[in-house]
Structure formats: C-alpha cells, structure tokens
Amino acid sequence: MDIHDINGNVPIFINIGEWDGDDEELDKAVKDVSNNNPNHTVIVDDIPLED
C-alpha cells in the first residue's frame, strides 16, 4: 500500500480491486485508515481496475 500525507478536507479513496485476503483483514485495513484520518470520508472501491 502506498502511504502519503493527506492534507485538507479531501476524501480518501481505497481501491482494493479483487481482495486476496480474508474479509476480516480487509475490514481491519479500512478501519485503520478511517481511524487514522477521522476528518476524512473514506470510500472503498472493490471494482477491479482494467489492464
């Protein structure tokens, strides 16, 4: 995962594509991002990117 400093009031988009891990790992990862950035909307996209 690429990690960048987020400044300003912008939403955070997470593209997971086809998740290879289990659902609990995904939930934990999304909650971690959300908890670390409480003033930002977190949007999860689970549609695979086209090549």
Image (cartoon, rainbow, N blue to C red):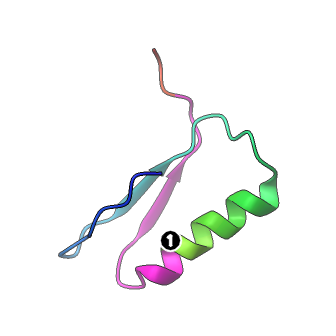
Q: Residue furthest top?
A: 51
Q: Please state the horizontal and vertical placement of residue 51, each as a whole percent of the image.
A: 45, 14
**Residue name at image x 76 percent, y 47 percent:** 21
**Residue name at image x 26 percent, y 70 percent:** 6
Picture quadrant of residue 10:
bottom left
Number of numbered callouts drawn: 1
Residue 39 on the magenta segment: yes
**Secondary structure state at the residue bearing disc 1:** helix
Residue 34 as seen in the image, left or right of residue 10: right
**Residue name at image x 59 percent, y 42 percent:** 46
Is the residue 26 above or below the residue 7 in the image? above
Query: Which residue carries the number 1 mark?
Result: 33
Is the residue 36 above or below the residue 50 in the image? below
Query: Disc 1 residue type?
Result: Val
Span highlighted in magenta in the image: 34-48
Is the residue 10 above or below the residue 15 in the image? below
Q: Please state the horizontal and vertical placement of residue 14, each as a whole percent of the image.
A: 47, 52
Residue 47 on the magenta segment: yes
Badge 1, how many Cα within 10 Å: few under 14, some, many 20+? Answer: some
Q: Nearer the viewer, residue 12 or 36?
A: 36
Q: Please state the horizontal and vertical placement of residue 11, each as a whole percent of the image.
A: 33, 65
**Residue name at image x 62 percent, y 65 percent:** 29
Residue 21 as seen in the image, left or right of residue 46: right
